[in-house]
Image: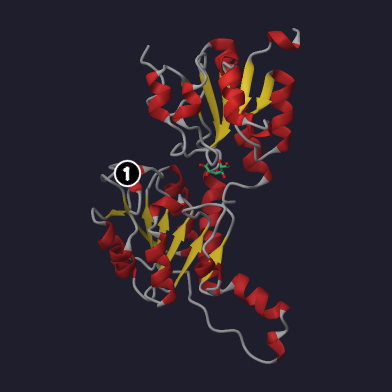
Amino acid sequence: MTTTALPRILQIGRLPLPALETELAARYHVTCLADQADPAGYLAMHGAEFSGVVTTASIGLQGEVIAALPHLQVISSFGVGFDALDIDAAKARGVQVGYTPGVLNDCVADMAFALMLDVSRGIAASDRFVRRGAWTQSRFALGSRVSGKRLGIVGMGRIGQAVAERASGFRMEVAYHNRRRDPGIAQQYFESLVELARWADYLVLTVAGGPATRHLVDSTVLQALGPQGFLINVARGSVVDEAALIDALTHRRIAGAGLDVFEDEPRVPEALMVLDNVVLTPHTASATHETRRAMADLVLENLDAFYTQGAVSVPVPGTTRPQ
Ligand code: 8YV
């Protein structure tokens, strides 16, 4: 096959795994929109040439870009979240959308525990303490025990269940809040998020982002979590009212927070950076060699399945027409 015969793929921005860019370029005729001097002008001029898009959960895909691609048939997104993708615009056009759920559950759940342990025992803070030579002058402050505590999971989906699984090794009591009780889940269900927060020592967010969960965790929920409670967010920054969180942390209305996601990534408010009862990670819950490789494989598999068999392997729910 000559290069011109390969399907034309528009890669919206840089991908988290450079090897994936090389692999895509070996199979498809790929153009990166972010590399264009004038992306809007490029889209207006060349949009009709592309039948596929590759993007990530973080970069997303705006409706205006979809509108500028009149022959778009397939979107393959790197990630499980699709809150930054205009799914309605894709559905309205009959564009298939593939994504990468499942393969990142373990790493995201591991990260939730890493943040819980770190913020409770002060791992990052004590590392800073040792490095600045403070150990020779003073003792590091006492932490909070994690084992045996109460873990409240907000969003008991695949990732929430992986978090719950890990909790048994810490002999933690687990309860959850979803929009509806899931009869397949044995743990205690709280219909009210405020009640779950009141019950929990740790409130772990593993719920999907998007308008339905925007600022789900607000000052009332934080107040209920209380001065001994910790908030862990490995979901989306949008799920938490960040201003209310900063206020609660600053005035110790909650004990601390472990945050992998923020409202305006990659910008993190200075008010969070100066607090020692907070652990901050740069949206890296899925960022291991193993998991990012598995995600990359699914991005390729979804595209390949579309171009060879007419359907992505793992569609975003509701994006394929019933047969
Ligand atoms: C990734 C994520 O960091 O899967 C998701 O929804 O947010 C993360 O796993 C992201 O996909 C990389 O852009």
Q: x and y percent of residue 248 in the render?
A: 38, 71
Residue 86, relative to residue 161: is it above or below?
A: above
Query: Residue at left 40%, top 77%?
Result: 251
Q: Quadrant of residue 78?
A: top right
What residue sits 26% from the left and 44% below the top?
A: 180
| Up/down of 15 relative to 267, above or below | above
Residue 26: percent from the left, percent from the top? 74, 21
| Picture coordinates of residue 55, whole percent (x, y) | 57, 32
Callout 1, which amino acid? Ala
Image quarter of residue 299: top right
Quarter occupied by the N terminus: top right
Q: Which residue is mark 1?
A: 212
Name above or below for residue 127 compared with residue 153.
below
Tag 1 secondary structure: helix
Residue 225 appears in view: yes
Quarter of the render that holds ligand 1:
top right
